[in-house]
Amino acid sequence: AAILARVVCHEVLPADVDRVITIDLGDILVLDDIRQLWDIGDHMEEHHFLAAPHAVSLHHVNGGLVIYNVRRMRERNFSGVALRAAEDGIRAAAVDESWDRACLRDQSIINIIHSFREEFGYAGPSPVMILPCRW
């Protein structure tokens, strides 16, 4: 449940919170000034709700470090987007063994709305900004 809290953070955080950074503390080390990561949020394009690194060798967006634009998530019904992505992931897992049937997590939702958006028929550009490799 806590792992999905990230994709609904805009529903539970106070209204004056516009941006958050989430980090998996168990397997990520920050070896530089995290302010540089925070400042990347100032450069997100208008259609971006969040920013996360792409794990090229694993062929997915890594949900272990994410900048969430909480204000945009509220304004643009990200709850509806996340719910649709969760439903798409559950349906895909029912018919395709390559989808993880055991656990739908925030990273799964992020990948559906970014990496699999065409496959599932999502309109427009991806709401995910890919972070520079160093992050």
Image (cartoon, rainbow, N blue to C red):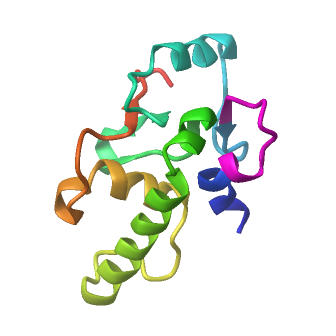
Residue 114: x and y, percent?
32, 48
Residue 135: x and y, percent?
51, 25
Instruction: Reply above or below: 63 against 87.
Output: above
The magenta stretch is: 9-21
Q: Would residue 16 be seen by someone viewing this image from the given angle?
A: yes
Which image quadrant is residue 66 in? top right
Residue 43: x and y, percent?
46, 14
Residue placed at 52% from the left, 16% from the top? Answer: 40
**Does residue 44 appear to the left or right of 18 in the view shown?**
left
Residue placed at 41% from the left, 21% from the top? Answer: 132
Residue placed at 33% from the left, 89% from the top? Answer: 94
Q: Nearer the viewer, residue 7 or 101?
A: 7
Q: Would residue 68 be seen by someone viewing this image from the given angle?
A: no
User: Residue placed farthest to the front in the image?
Assistant: 75
Q: Nearer the viewer, residue 119 or 16?
A: 16
Instruction: Reply above or below: 56 against 133.
Output: below
Instruction: Reply above or below: 13 against 97.
Output: above
User: Within the magenta stretch, is there residue 17?
Assistant: yes
**Does residue 69 appear to the left or right of 45 in the view shown?**
right
